[in-house]
Each structure stands twice: as structure tokens, then as C-alpha cells.
């Protein structure tokens, strides 16, 4: 029971973070990006339901472990890419174009 709770919690955290990355990366055109994400997720779920009738449990677990590992690796790659682009965009918005907006000095 506890392990199923942990799997559900991990899945919800994973999906929340993925949706956050997609929303940030494709902020100008996010609806098609979310649609493609859900489409691929649904296709993979349907594929898993299909092969579950034909493969033994050991092979299903092997597929689960391999795709989970690959998904985690690509997730961290996407997270690091999104984080680096966030840092660059934050520094650009703080700089304000390099002119300094209004001086407080009263030298004259």
C-alpha cells in the first residue's frame, strides 16, 4: 500500500514538473505543445495495455525500468535546459537594456 502511494506521488510530481517545463518552454504557443504531450502519453499507455496481454511480467518490468530510466534521463536534460534558459531570461529582464534608468545624483 505504501509503495503504491509513493508511485502515485512520484508520478504526480513528475507530471507536474513536466507540464511546468512545457508551459515555460512553449509559452507563446502552449496549447499544441500540451496536446502533443498528452497524445504521446496516451499512445504509450495504449501500447502498454496492448502488450500486457502478450508479454510475461518479467518483460513488462524490464520495459518499465528501461523506459523509466530513459524518461528520467531526458527529464533531467530538459529541466537543466529550461533552467539555464530561465536564468538567461531573468538576467536580461533585470538589466533593462544597459542604460540605467534614472540617476539619483544631483551634480550639476
Image (cartoon, helix red, strand yellow):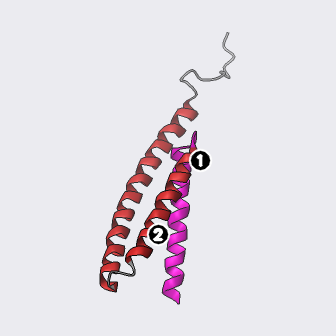
Is the residue 4 above or below the residue 44 in the image? below
For residue 100, which quarter of the picture? top right
- Identify which residue is drawn at 46% across, 69% down: 46
The image position of residue 21, as x and y in percent, is 51, 52
The image position of residue 8, as x and y in percent, is 53, 77
Q: Is residue 77 magenta?
A: no
Q: What separation in Å lies between label 1 and label 2 (alpha carbons)?
A: 21 Å
* Location of mark 2 (residue): 45
* Location of mark 1 (residue): 31
| Residue lying furthest bottom | 1
Left or right of 75, for residue 18: right
- Identify which residue is drawn at 41% across, 73% down: 48
Mark sitting earlier along the chain (1/2):
1
The image position of residue 16, as x and y in percent, is 56, 62
Q: Which residues are magenta?
A: 1-29
Q: Is residue 17 magenta?
A: yes
Is the residue 61 above or below the residue 106 in the image? below
Amino acid at each position: 500500500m505504501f509503495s503504491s502511494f509513493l508511485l502515485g506521488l512520484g508520478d504526480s510530481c513528475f507530471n507536474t514538473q513536466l507540464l511546468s517545463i512545457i508551459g515555460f518552454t512553449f509559452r507563446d504557443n502552449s496549447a499544441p505543445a500540451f496536446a502533443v504531450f498528452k497524445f504521446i502519453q496516451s499512445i504509450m499507455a495504449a501500447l502498454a495495455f496492448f502488450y500486457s496481454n502478450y508479454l510475461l511480467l518479467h518483460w513488462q518490468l524490464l520495459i518499465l525500468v528501461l523506459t523509466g530510466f530513459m524518461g528520467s534521463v531526458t527529464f533531467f536534460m530538459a529541466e537543466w535546459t529550461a533552467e539555464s534558459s530561465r536564468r538567461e531570461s531573468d538576467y536580461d529582464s533585470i538589466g533593462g537594456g544597459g542604460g540605467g534608468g534614472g540617476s539619483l545624483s544631483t551634480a550639476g
